[in-house]
Structure formats: C-alpha cells, structure tokens
Amino acid sequence: MSANEIQKKLLVIEDDPGLQKQLRWNFDDCSVAVASDRESALVQIRKHEPAVVTMDLGLPPDPDGATEGLATLQQILALAPDTKVIVLTGNQNHENALKAISMGAYDFHQKPLDANVLNLIVNRAFYLHRLQRENRELLKSTSSTDIPGLITNDPGMLKICQEIKRIAPSDVTVTLLGESGTGKEVLANALHQLSRRKRNKIIAVNCAAIPESLLETELFGYEKGAFTGAARQTPGKIELAQGGTFFLDEIGDLPLALQAKLLRFLQERVIERVGGREEIPVDVRVVCATHQNLKKMIEAGTFRGDLYYRLCEINIQIPALRDRIEDAVLLAHHFKNHFRIKEKRQALNFSQDALDAISNHSWPGNIRELENCIKRAVIMAEGSQITAEDLGLLPGEKIFEPATLREVRDQAEQEMLIKVLARVNGNIARAAELLGVTRPTLYDLMNRHGLK
C-alpha cells in the first residue's frame, strides 16, 4: 500500500443507506470504510485508523438528536486524537455542530450535502492530517544535539552541544554557567551519559537547597557518634558517586568553610567523613553549575579563587532563552504536546497571536517559566486553540543590531529559516511554501546553516 493510500483512509459514519452510497461515490479516490452506529464506528477506528471521519450526529438509538453522535465523537477523539472528524448536521442543529467543534471536531457541514464543498473540507482535513504526521516525524529529529531532554535549533546552543560531546569522554572538571532555568542540569546529565562513567550513578547536591548546618554531612558523610543523633555510619553524596559523576549544583552558594574542604578533595581525591580520621579515596568526575558570577564573588571575598580555578577547568556559558533564536516557539510546541497527552486533551494548536507572544516574550524564568506557562495554557484553553490570553502574554518588540552587510544577510537568512520552521512546528513542506522556495532549496539552506 502506498503512502498516498495510507493517508486517504476515510471512515463514513452514517445510518442512512442512501447517504452511505452517495458518500462512497463522492469519495471514490479514498479508501472508504462505513459504519452505521457507535459500536461499529469504534471497531473501524481501531481496525483502519482513518485519517478523516465524516459523521452524522443523529445516530441510533437517537437518530433525531445529537446525544449518541456527540458521545461517539468523544470516544473517537479519545482513541485517535489526531483524526479529523467532520460532523454532518441538519439545518436546525447549528448549536450541536458548534458543541462538536468545541469538543475537538475538525469542522462541520450542513445537510443537504454539497458534494463540492464537502470534498473541499475533507481534502483540507487530509492535508492537515498529513502535515501533522510529518510534524511528529520531524519533531523526533528536530534537535540535532543527540542530548536527551535538550531541544534546540539555536546555533549557539548547537555549538555548546558539540562541546559537551567532545568534553564528556574526559574526566575534566566542568562548570556550567547560566541563569536559572536554562538547562544546566540537562547538560550535566548529558556529560555523564556521554562519558565512560555512564554505567555508574550521577549524584547531585544543590548547595542552595540544603541548610549550611547539614551541607557538610550531606557532602562528606559522618561516622557513628560524630554528633547527637548519628546512630550509624553514613556515607556522603561524594562517596556515593564512586565511579560515576558528582554534580554540585549552585556551587556559588557553598559556604566558605566548606569551600576549603571541597578544594582539598579536588586536589587529593580523598575525603574524611565528619567525626572520622580515615582518608577515603573517591574516583568521581565533578561537574558544577551556578547562576552567579563567580569572578565577582572572588572579588567580594565570598568565593575562593583557588577553588574557582580547580572547578573551572572548562567553563560553559549557557545562553538565556531570550537569546536563543525561536527556541521558545520550538519548546512551546514540545511542552504543548507533552501536557496535552498528560491532561488527556484533544488536539491543541497555537493561534498566531500566541506564537507571536511566545516569540516576543523575554522569558526571565527561561525554560522553567515557559514550561509552566504552557502547562497552564493547556489546562485553561477552551476549544482547540491556545491563545495569547490563555498564555497570559502580550506581544512585545525585539531589537535587532546589524553588523556587516554579509553578516546581516547570513544572520537574517538563518533567523528566518529557524523562525519559519519553528512556526510550522518543523514541517518542511509548509516551511518551503511560506518561504517561497522548493523543498530541495530549503534543504540546501538548512544544511548551509547547520539546521535539521
């Protein structure tokens, strides 16, 4: 069976034999299956997985109402949320048609049937279904990073990903610098998963989340009887990371007293538990992260310079989301799909004003803020579209600072490619259409600018 035949599967749900025959004839270019009630319709959905369904709302045992039809629609969309359902209604059923649309139906057509209009609606539904299928396939390879959990098309972030891949196999100590919510933990995990230590654990400690009085025992462990309540010997997180990676998050919040002890560990690769005298050798790879400016902290006397140079054998500065070209839109699609499934919502798409708002917002909370914003919008959105109002955002202005003419041209071309691909959720056919180029030309441009 060809790809065209797969995408042209149509299910007709109609209890009138005459209309069944008319619809079969009307769509003779499709692979048409027919059902006359809810039970047979659900069987056909499971069996054939049609891309498009036409459905009379007046189904038995309620042929004169819409109760059975709406219940069938709800079950169809629960089984196959990407299926495009077109409801067929009488002239007096406009209210039920609108209700069906609000439940997730793609469109409606009033009887008596107009073959040309219905053909147009059905073909448009097939086209949209195909585009969305291509989107999903492309989304699987949207990120050319090969780093789990990281989705980006921004050139700066892609360069960082290449650095991560080169650094990961070594045991060099890495410090990840960037604002809160930019993905430092994701990159720390990538450094571990791409290293020779991936079979062992990555153990993380957040210096900002643990009280100073407890942080030493959390890091280095303690011996039985070291203090009141120390009923047994307990290894610390550094020791537990033996053979793996130790991730020290928010290193800028590490108290000065502990900075000296951490420095000794980094120099000699041994630790002493609190209350103990035995030196315990530990083989771990150390990765740190912070949103603070460590150099300024050194000048202020709140961070040790010698510790800084031990930790920062390699520094990686992660850009804020506002500085990553259209990654906000790309990530918004990803989070929308994730939360739509989690919240058991029917098909959801962003309106144009929502995409503009996402693209123009400065995202001071970075990816974490974006994720929470999209989660709320998926829950709050009415109907099948997420609007800027659902997001709680307003469109803003972006500032563009040109350089040389060649740089302006290249940067504008690259940014436009990324923006259009993000807006159409990675669909190549639609992106080529919007840019006014052929698919091969678009692929050439993407290759030239390192995009996938």
Image (spheres, rainbow, N blue to C red):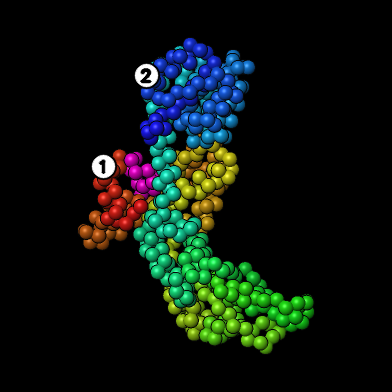
Three-letter code for the amino acid on which mark 1 is drawn: Thr
Residue 25 horizontal/vertical position (percent): 40, 16
Q: Residue at x 51, y 37 (%)?
A: 347
Residue 205 horizontal/vertical position (percent): 60, 70
Q: Does residue 260 appear to the left or right of 273 in the view shown? A: left
**Residue picked out by circle 2:** 116
Q: Residue at x 52, y 57 (%)?
A: 368
Q: Vertically, is 36 above or below 417?
A: above
**What is the CA distance from the residue labelled 2 to the residue labelled 1?**
30 Å
Q: Residues within 10 Å of mark 2 (few under 14, many from 20)?
A: few
Furthest residue toward bottom: 277
Q: Is residue 219 visible?
A: no
Q: Based on the displayed image, in which of its 4 quarters is residue 223 positioned?
A: bottom right
Residue 438: mark: 1
Q: Is residue 330 magenta?
A: no
Q: Residue at x 75, y 77 (%)?
A: 232
Q: What kind of secondary structure does the magenta stretch mostly adopt?
A: helix
Residue 340 horizontal/vertical position (percent): 54, 43
The magenta segment is: 419-431
Furthest residue toward front: 1
Q: Quadrant of the N terminus?
A: top left
